[in-house]
Image (spheres, rainbow, N blue to C red):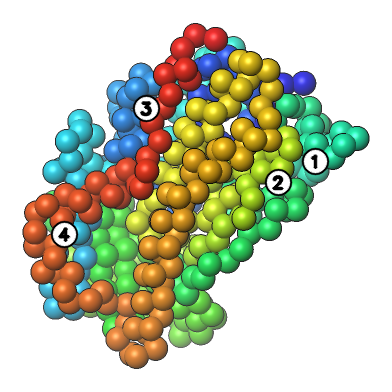
Amino acid sequence: MVDVVIAGGGPGGMVLGYLLARAGVEVTVLESRQDFDRDFRGDSLHPYTLELLDQLGLADDLLRLGHYKARSFRFHTTKASFSVAAYDRLDTPFDYVALMPQARFLDFLAAEAARLPTFSLELGAKVTGLLTDETGVVAGVRHRRGEIRCELLVGADGRFSTVRRLAGLPARSLGATTDILWFRLPRDPADPPGADLELYFGPESYLGVLGGVRDWQVGYSVAKGDYARLRERGIEPVREFVRARVPWLADRVHLLTDFAQTTLLSVDISRVDRWYRPGLLLLGDAAHVISPVGGNGILMAVQDAVAAANRLVPAFRHGTPATEDLAAIQRDRLPAIEKVQAQQVRVERRSARARARGRGAEPPAFLRRLFAIPALRAKGARDNAYGPYPPRLDPVVLSAP
């Protein structure tokens, strides 16, 4: 028996596991895979996350690992280029988004958490069933390597959450109209030094370019339902889009030769109406799927972990978390999640209408005039860096157990 089992070793699960174990709560994290290495997972560590890690005394060591500092987010339309977020205008030592392979970040967290006596991590432990008591309260979990009983099970196992399905807590789709085809192209020393987070718009699609230490992560938008038709046409239309809209990558786009070099991410925006039941809590994408556009997914999951720790640590110090504590975590986080998802749904609907009119996904022309104002670029950066209603870590989580 342990206090908490967290199913899912993503950013939300690992941050929550670390925070709880640091406060003396006994935690076991179950990760279904044998390692954290996945391609094209979110790589964005926002200023909020870096400030949190700094508060925990971890930021300096983390940032000694290879990463890329993105200091702006720019739109490139067919008529103009302009910045919509200037992170270097933020009043923080971390005036950038750190782009770091997620596996590197998770390996770092796992190593730091392993120093704590009440933390354990089990790899290759895919959840297969829930354990319940005679009243139906969740009392533990079965996994491929055995079973473990706990006072609280946290499902942080992503958009296709097994815990969510087993718990009978369905997610409700809010509407997404786009998928993203991801691939990588190598970085060259002659590439534009100011290229950080770029979005290039064209007649039918848009292309996201994210900086990295050795390469560029590139995402090509595909209307939902159109992937099969794209494959029939072959990879050339994708290469041609890159050549036409991102000319500084044209000299290496020939290296993309086949769809086998790509990964299709089905964009989803959905939310579970109730994130909990007695003995069980859902967090991160298991509770609310965030579109990858804007890179908010990791940020929202980390903030979920902070909000959960703020409630769970005092509850464990006085006994065991009650269902009302779990409901309070959802109440704490729901306004921010609703606001982020509502904005993303608006963007998806606007893109769908533009495509239907043959205008592609290009943003309205007035945005260029708006973001010519420095204060608005700073606001754009602040909104993306911290999200709405960012939770602050309660000092009780950092206090000795």
SS label for mark 2: helix
Q: How far apart are marks 2 and 4 (CA)?
A: 40 Å
Q: Mark 4 points at which residue?
A: 83
How would you rate the neighbour count of disc 4 (Cα within 10 Å): few for under 14, some for 14-19, many for 20 or more? Answer: many
How would you rate the neighbour count of disc 1 (Cα within 10 Å): few for under 14, some for 14-19, many for 20 or more? Answer: many
How would you rate the neighbour count of disc 3 (Cα within 10 Å): few for under 14, some for 14-19, many for 20 or more? Answer: some
Q: How far apart are marks 4 and 3 (CA)?
A: 28 Å
Kind of residue indicated by mark 2: Val
Kind of residue indicated by mark 3: Leu
Find the residue positioned furthest to the right: 134
Q: Can residue 67 be seen in this view?
A: no
Please state if 114 lies on the left or on the right of 239 as rendered: right
Rendered residue at 73%/35% (across/down): 279
Rendered residue at 69%/50% (across/down): 164
Find the residue positioned furthest to the top: 400
SS label for mark 4: strand
Rendered residue at 8%/59% (across/down): 373
- Ranked by sequence position, the earlier of labels 4 and 3 is 3
**Quadrant containing the C terminus in the rendered view:** top right
Q: Mark 3 points at which residue?
A: 53
Kind of residue indicated by mark 4: Ser
Please state if 250 lies on the left or on the right of 262 as rendered: left
Q: Name the residue under label 1.
A: 130
Q: Can residue 282 be seen in this view?
A: yes
Kind of residue indicated by mark 1: Leu
Q: Distance between the residues labelled 2 and 1?
A: 8 Å
